[in-house]
Amino acid sequence: MPFIRESIVTTLNADGSAHLAPLGVIEEPPFLVLAPFHPSTTLANLRRHPFACVSYVTDVRLFAGCVSRVRRDWPVVAAERIEGWRAAAALAHSELEVVETVEDAQRPRWRCREVHAATHAPFLGFNRAQSAVLEAAILVSRLGMLPAAKIESELRYLAIGLAKTAGAAEREAWGWLMERVRAAGYAVPEDCGHPLSTG
């Protein structure tokens, strides 16, 4: 099985601004592989400008904000070796250049070489709430693709760990995701001891 790092990938929009998207980056040494779904802004940007930054963050609001479409305008910092941007909240980041594209109707694969990497702050680990939000964001990105029963049962389980360990940032991120889940017609987990959702 491939080793996948959940990250925030930034690509360059046509106007020079940054597009942020949660994406699992696949390790296939010596390459890092990006496989965004078709159609997507990330995919279109890579076709026009074959470079990207991978930001490794612990502020899970970036994942939840992008997936729920509540907030995408997160602060960015200019990349060091490529024309592009990284998330300002990145604990570490990699700057990538596409070297090969493998076309696919659903998820083209972009094999990239790392041209620069830097660490900006120590990684102290995820707590259960951060992990729960990350997993919930992945589920939300698959609404309409997975059975409703699977999504709802997994969210109920994730809500348990979230209720026990969430801080304000994790509760805010969870609330954004649950609003998206509710709007899509799915059941939202009941409160497990903390204000897990709004409305």
Image: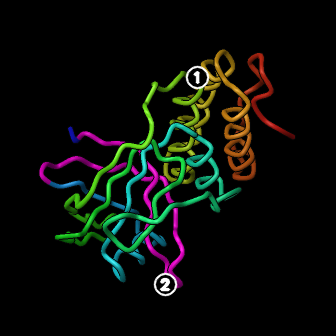
Residue under the point 59% across and 55% down: 66
Classify 10 Å Cα crowding around label 1: few (below 14), some (14-19), many (20 and above). few
Provide the residue designation for mark 1. Answer: 157
Q: Is residue 8 magenta?
A: yes
Residue 182 place in picture, x, y as percent: 74, 45
Foreground residue, 148 or 67?
Answer: 67
Q: Which quadrant: the N terminus?
A: top left
- 181 sits to left or right of 106: right
Q: Position of residue 105 (x, y in %)?
A: 31, 71
Q: Secondary structure at mark 1?
A: helix
Name the main secondary structure of what is drawn in magenta.
strand
In percent of width and height, residue 174 lies at 68, 37
Q: Quadrant of residue 73?
A: bottom right
- Seen at 78% across and 35% down, the residue is 197
Q: Residue 170's image quarter?
A: top right
Image: 62 above or below 14: above
User: Do labels 2 and 1 touch, CB within 8 Å?
Assistant: no
Residue that numbered label 2 is attached to:
14
What is the basis of the colouring in this image?
rainbow
Image quadrant for the C terminus? top right
Under mark 2, the amino acid is Ala
